[in-house]
Amino acid sequence: MSFLRFVVRRLVELAVTLLGASFVVFGAMYLAPGSPTSFLLSGRSASPEALAALNAQYHLDDPFLVRYLRWLGQVLQGDFGRSITYRTDVAKLLGDRLPATLLLVAMALVVVVVLGLLLGRFGAVRGGATDSAILVSTTLAIGTPSFVAAVLLQGLFSVKLGWFPSSGTGDGLADMLWHLTLPAIALALYLIGMLARVTRSAMLEELGSEHVTVARSRGVPERQVISRHVFRNALGTVLTTGGLIVSTLLVCTILVESAFSIGGVGQLLELATTTKDFPTVQAISLLIVALFMLVNLVVDLLHPLVDPRVTLGSRRSAA
């Protein structure tokens, strides 16, 4: 399959999947108990006329399909509606809060990739006590939820030692990086353990393969065997977890942002869900789905470059 045909096919699949996801995202909020009018009224009673005016303002009385099609048409034009909670455009809310969340996710992703690959590689190559120590540490990391890690790191490094800020995002890039260091580590901890184990398992499988045995029998230095024949081929398997890693980071950022009082998209989603802010929840949910699908598209495009045994449209290695 040619590169262009593959990209076009995947983009069409992405568009169709996003369309289906948009329907699910839009309808899911209406299945939840409660209604946005109860939040808008804040427990106060309202006359039938006032309630009707409120429903008319937010089109809450329109048939479901009419509301969905109107919302979809607005989304396609970049209009995600008006927040019920903040009484402002959802697009503006996302624009104000998205940079902090993207920077947090990017920092956590760097930590996950660097430490996960290093630990997995050391465990597979060194073996013995080093491998055992890495297995124990990664087991602890996987067993520690993000919000627990956030509380522990905050208590030790912010409250007790005073090395890092305990909340907020700071002003300016350098200050933001400083404020987001602990949140990024808390967000990355579980995924470091997961990626390290995936890397270790993939490398151990490659170490027992025939082409590695042949390379060693030809006198290829062990360092080159590990780098060119083991680690590189193992990266193909590791790369397939990219979508899972990014989606987990996007979901867990809700808990971490709340713990560190980071005014990002995660904290906005938590508040919007609590207050039944339909437009905000729908916009953020659709954004997460779109990012997840784009990451998977990038993984499919990069996979053949990392592992030549894989062709476009297939992530399976050649026998």
Image (cartoon, grey):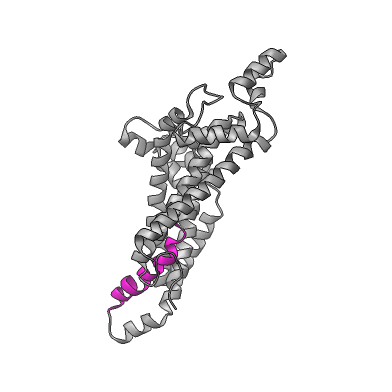
Dominant secondary structure (helix, strand or loop) of the stretch shown in magenta: helix
Residue for point 53% across, 26% down: 83
Comparing 44 with 225, the one in front is: 44
- Residue 192 rendering spot, x and y as whole percentages: 46, 55
- Residue 122 rendering spot, x and y as whole percentages: 39, 66
Residue 254 shown in magenta: no
- Residue 190 rendering spot, x and y as whole percentages: 50, 53
Which part of the image, by quadrant, shows the C terminus? Answer: bottom left
Tell me the magenta residue range.
221-242
Residue for point 47% across, 69% down: 201
Comparing 115 with 244, the one in front is: 244
- Residue 22 rendering spot, x and y as whole percentages: 55, 42
> Compared to 7, does 304 lie above or below?
below
- Image-quadrant location for residue 51: top right
> Compared to 156, does 95 lie above or below?
above
In the image, taking residue 95 as reference, residue 149 lies left or right, namely right
Residue 246 visible in this rendered orientation of the protein: no
Comparing 109 with 306, the one in front is: 306
Residue 231 shown in magenta: yes
Residue 56 visible in this rendered orientation of the protein: yes
- Image-quadrant location for residue 119: bottom left
Which part of the image, by quadrant, shows the N terminus? Answer: bottom left
Q: How many marks?
A: 0
> Compared to 174, does 52 lie above or below?
above
